[in-house]
Image (cartoon, rainbow, N blue to C red):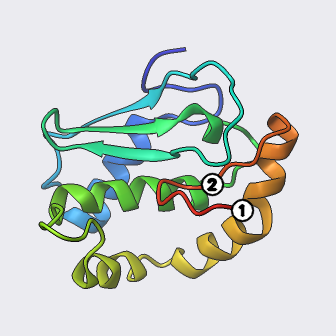
Amino acid sequence: MSRRMGRVYDLKSLFDRLNRIYFDGRLSDIQVEWANRKPERALRSVTLGEYFADRKLIRISRRLDQARVPLFFLEHILFHEMLHAVFPRDSHKMHTEKFRKFERMQPDYERAKAWEKKNLKLLFEADQMNLFTRKKRIEL
């Protein structure tokens, strides 16, 4: 398994498609990879996606490289991280109103948020007996 090609999903192909559709190819200098799984520990939250501006790198949790995670949800997480490259953090907020406005423009936004609310807790409870959520670290 490479850092871009997972067991189920090929992040590079997904990134390239989203970059073409939503960003007119402007994010071609960004790298994308699956994060290595960290040793299991008692957590109440986990990061599913992260953008590192200094390295121009998006890293997505391998926990999303499962057949039970729908493509539209993985694309939502990836799109969210791609937006961080376009709308850098301001001095006070990571997710500005402008960022949120563009995030909501993704066609599957509502569907992905509904899937997350309904399934994410169960998905990760099945993976291990801990509870996990997205980058924003909402406690379940």
Q: State whether residue 26 is above or below residue 7.
A: below
**Left or right side of 87 for 131:** right
Residue assigned mark 1 = 140
Q: Mark 1 packing: few (<14 Cα in 10 Å), some, or many (20+)?
A: few
Residue sitting at 29 percent across and 45 percent down?
51
User: Which of the 4 quarters of the picture holds residue 114?
Assistant: bottom right
Residue assigned mark 2 = 133
Residue sitting at 58 percent across and 32 percent down?
62
Q: Secondary structure at mark 2?
A: loop
Q: Position of residue 33 (x, y in %)?
A: 39, 30
Residue extending farthest top? 1
Q: Do the CB atoms of the residues marked 1 and 2 lie less than 8 Å apart?
A: yes
Observer-nearest residue: 20 or 79? Answer: 79
Q: Secondary structure at mark 1?
A: loop
Q: Name which residue type carries label 2.
A: Thr
Which of the two labelled residues, at mark 1 and mark 2, occupies the earlier sequence position?
Answer: 2
